[in-house]
Amino acid sequence: MNIKETLFSLSNAVNVGNLHEASDIAFDILSKYAETERKDNLTVIGKIKGESDYTIMLDAHLDEVAFVVTDVDDKGFLTVAKCGGIDLRTLPARVVTVHGKEKIPAVFCSTPPHLSSGEKEYTDIGELKLDTCLGSSAKDIISVGDYVTYRQKATALNGTIVTGKSFDDRAGVVCLLELAERLSRKKLPVSVSFVLCDWEELGLRGSKIASFEVNPDEAVAIDVSFGDGPDISPDECGNISGGAMIGVSPVLCREISDKLFNIAKEKGILHQAEIMGGKTGTDGDVISTTQNGVKTGLVSIPLRNMHTDVELLDIKDIESICDILEQYILSGGVSNG
Amino acid sequence: MVDILRQLCTLDATSGDETAVRNFIINEIKYFCELKTDNLGNIIAFKKGKKTPTRKLMIDAHMDEVGLIISSVTDKGFLKFKTVGGIDTAVLLSRRVLINGKTYGVIGGKPIHLTSGDEAKKLPKADNLYIDIGAKDKEEALKTVSLGDRAVICSEFLSCNDKITSKALDDRIGCAILIQLIKQESEYDFYGSFSVQEEVGLRGAKVSAFSIDPDSAIILEGTTAADIADVSSDKQVCALGDGAAVSFMDGATVYDREYYNLALTSGIKCQVKRAVSGGNNSGAVHLNKSGVRTVAVSVPCRYIHSASSVADINDINSALALAKHLINKICGEAV
């Protein structure tokens, strides 16, 4: 599998609510390597059986931050609500796609200079109307409840540094697909469930039901985390190109974290620690409290500009995660502990 | 018209760096007029008509667009920049940019998860923004980018339902109209000025007006339209679909009232620009030498100076028709 090409095709695809392009792509790839099924809730679950029934669940989320239409007016302007955490300040004059009966490009209104007196505050997405340029015919094509998504196509910047929309968490999805390919060729001491779930951005909802269904013995969530930048304090972020961010937190299983660190050190795989004081803000938070409780680890890809359409990461950091987790699964996770 | 406009908008030409647009225009018009490029880079074209009027007429559109100029590189390889022309930071946050037509970068920032309170509500100052080209340090960044390089916000040219969305509609619309006027047969001789450096203080038109030395001038422009949701009619300035906008007065010019009336009585769909704000090359041209009788024909653009301005193709056609009408009336000495 070409990691960059797969990431780009997943990133350019859309996955929110009833729109499931990325889910379709991921399903087709995962089906090649694992016994794969789709659930009604758009969750994709692939299983590779190993020598024992001890099951390690790998988790990444397919959904992306987006918007949903709440009103269509007579002049073709839309009011929208957010699906996930979006910085309102990044929206004026941005072109997005409205998924009505057709895909319609639309522009978030930007207040012209003659109307802005003093410093404008961005607190209410209801004030940021979306211009469809359709006039009164907007109502024929667009309905309340239709989704609106970013429309940026992924591209390479410098070498293995790439930028695009929805790398959160298509980058994690790519890790799972790459691991499925690698592990499908190997004899595994344990069974592995590859879980691609929905609605992470609205409060870890998809993973809650998916992990209940799988009920694994242990789990590792793969997500993105904050990459370094000039305006971010170094203890709040990892370094882009600095390798896999191995999570350590009160809600995560220390045994798993330690084993991930040991593998990375032994095999000389680039890695860095991500220390959190409590919840991780990832699917790991809900997987760990599933059924009788699940030992859970977290590995993250450092990413800049999270939840915008100019997310940025290094493909090499994805490779580091795959290298560490491949060894982790081959060694049976913490099943012997 | 839409096709020419698409090609013009796709080219990058921040003020002082208009070469790409200039070369394209020269290639389009060279068989239809006599032309020269002056010391600042303005194209001055002489269009021979059927008749030579007693009043010398200049028609101006500017080639440059707003953008960014790279001013320094941090040790970690991030590019600091200054804005070229009036750009609101609200349209810069989290955008992909293209530097020198070859290197992509993104304008990054702290993720929403790590911002709170006032920081999350208010726009950062442009001084605090930076372009990230994925370089690991200063040395690597300077292998692909040099100080003084220009950047523009990447945009798609979209056209649907008679509406066009793109960067640089201000003033490639004017350029596209002037190209048409030059390519078509004209009743009267006129001079076309495709000017540089409008967005940094109407600098190109000042010298092209001096060298053309016109008696009358028509300025073709894009102007702000605020006919958007939640803006009351009195603050909309002009509206898409209501025709070309004609100004009586703006921040830089009091326009020739007789020419203004010629436009309003032309029978061609047009509207009055209902605000005394902004300015365009008229400001430089109408004060040339002993003064020039000047009229501005503007196409309404929503979100002007952003990478996604919106204009209506019908207004562009109205502006073209109105410009032709004004050539004939002014040169025919109707007033």
Image (cartoon, coloured by chain):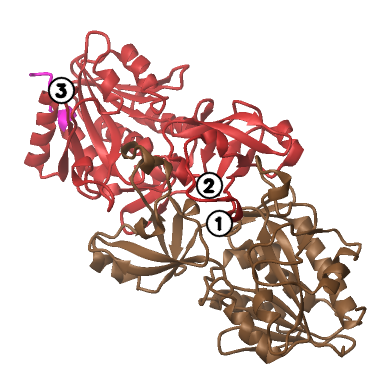
Chain colours: A red, B brown
Q: Quadrant of residue A334 in the image?
A: top left
> What separation in Å lies between label 3 and label 2 (alpha carbons)?
42 Å
Q: Do the residues under discs 2 and 1 have CB atoms within 8 angstroms?
A: yes
Relative image position of residue A201 (x, y in whole percent): 40, 29
Relative image position of residue A220 (x, y in whole percent): 23, 26
Mark 3 — residue?
A253
Relative image position of residue B260 (x, y in whole percent): 82, 69
> What separation in Å lies between label 2 and label 1 (alpha carbons)?
9 Å
Same-subunit check for callouts 3 and 2: yes
Q: Using the image, tell me which numbered label, if any, was put on residue B306.
A: 1
Report the label total: 3
Q: Using the image, tell me which numbered label, if any, was put on residue A92.
A: 2
Q: Chain of mark 2?
A: A
**In this view, B173 is above or below A149:** below
Q: Quadrant of residue A203 in the image?
A: top left
| Residue type indicated by callout 3 | Cys
Magenta residues, dominant SS class: loop
Label 3: element kind: loop
| Residue type indicated by callout 1 | Ser
Q: Residue at x 35, y 34 (%)?
A: A173
| Residue type indicated by callout 2 | Pro
**In this view, B191 is above or below A5:** below
Relative image position of residue B168 (x, y in whole percent): 59, 63
**In this view, B284 is above or below A221:** below
Q: Quadrant of residue B118 in the image?
A: top left
How crowded pointer 2 is (Cα within 10 Å; few <14, some 14-19, many 20+) is rated as many
Residue A34 within the segment the image draws in magenta: no
Q: Do the residues under discs 3 and 2 have CB atoms within 8 angstroms?
A: no
The residue stretch that appears in magenta: A328-337
